[in-house]
Image (tube, grey):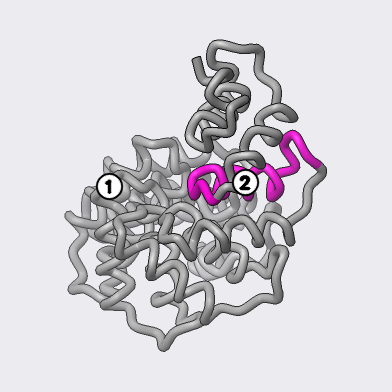
Amino acid sequence: MYRKAADQGHAKAQRHLGFCYDDGEGVPQDKVKAVYWYTKAAEQGDVYAQNCLGVCYENGEGVPQDKAKAVYWYTKAAEQGNEDAQCNLGFCYENGEGVPQDKAKAVYWYTKAAEQGQARAQSNLGCCYYSGEGVPQDKVKAVYWFTKAAEQGQARAQFNLGYCYHNGEGVPQDYAKAIYWYTKAAEQGYKNAILERGRAYLADWQHDQAFKDFNEAIRLDPNKAYAYACRGTMYLMKSQVDQAISDIKMALNLDPNDDLAKSTWQRIPEVYK
């Protein structure tokens, strides 16, 4: 259906045919043909094809990787108001991919996309405000944008929002809300959320839940020094000194500079070492 219209020069059909080849829907997947049809549509000004073509150039799918060309096509689409292209272009400016790094331009394009509800742009814009990159640092605005993205299910934003509530950054400290958002992120496979949720449980005196999370964090990443340091600290709080020593030694072996492990080691009585 799309082929006939695409052959006749209809941009929308060309774009949809590109989708089909890109995803292998109704035809064998063929990234080269996807690029061919995206290009046909993009050259006619189809904003969605322009963004898709930018993605192909950025990732080297169906065409040799060329981040400058990715920026070219993202810009074409972004200037027409496509929020996904605006976010992608912001990312390129933030990281200096295909264009000289420019944090202010990154914020500009993230803002354009975020205001249209693009969740990844909202999350990235929150990070810019949090760290003060490309914009004056403003953790209240960071929380605002993290919340927008988190409510759309963006896992990184959910984690960051949990972290803000956990530490009282840009918002009053609230362990219950921190745990809520860490859980949302963890349910999407964001592994660091489990460890940080354990820390929030510990701060909220929910020791059993904290211990479970520290165990799970170690199971998911046996090489994470900070997870051993957290669990070792809990063991020491429970006067289980042998287990504390074992975990703290493991943490220091993995990362001799882990501050929590070093401070906990200093608290262990010399007679046990």
Marks 2/1: CA–CA distance: 23 Å
> Is the C terminus in the top left, top right, bottom left or bottom right quadrant?
bottom right
Q: How crowded is the residue under tag 2: few (<14 C-alpha within 10 Å), some, or many (20+)?
A: many
Residue found at x 17% / y 55%? 176
The residue closer to the viewer here, 32 or 90, is: 32
Q: In front of the other: label 2 or label 1?
A: 2
Q: How crowded is the residue under tag 1: few (<14 C-alpha within 10 Å), some, or many (20+)?
A: some
| Disc 2 and disc 1 in contact, CB within 8 angstroms | no
From the image, tell me which residue sits under label 1.
152
Q: Secondary structure at mark 1?
A: loop
For residue 136, side relative to residue 229 (left or right) = left
Relative to 62, is 126 above or below?
below
Q: Which mark is residue 71?
A: none
The residue sitting at the right extreme is 64
For residue 24, side relative to residue 159 (left or right) = right
Residue found at x 57% / y 63%? 75
Q: Amino acid at mark 1?
A: Gln
Q: Locate residue 109, reporting x and y percent.
A: 46, 69
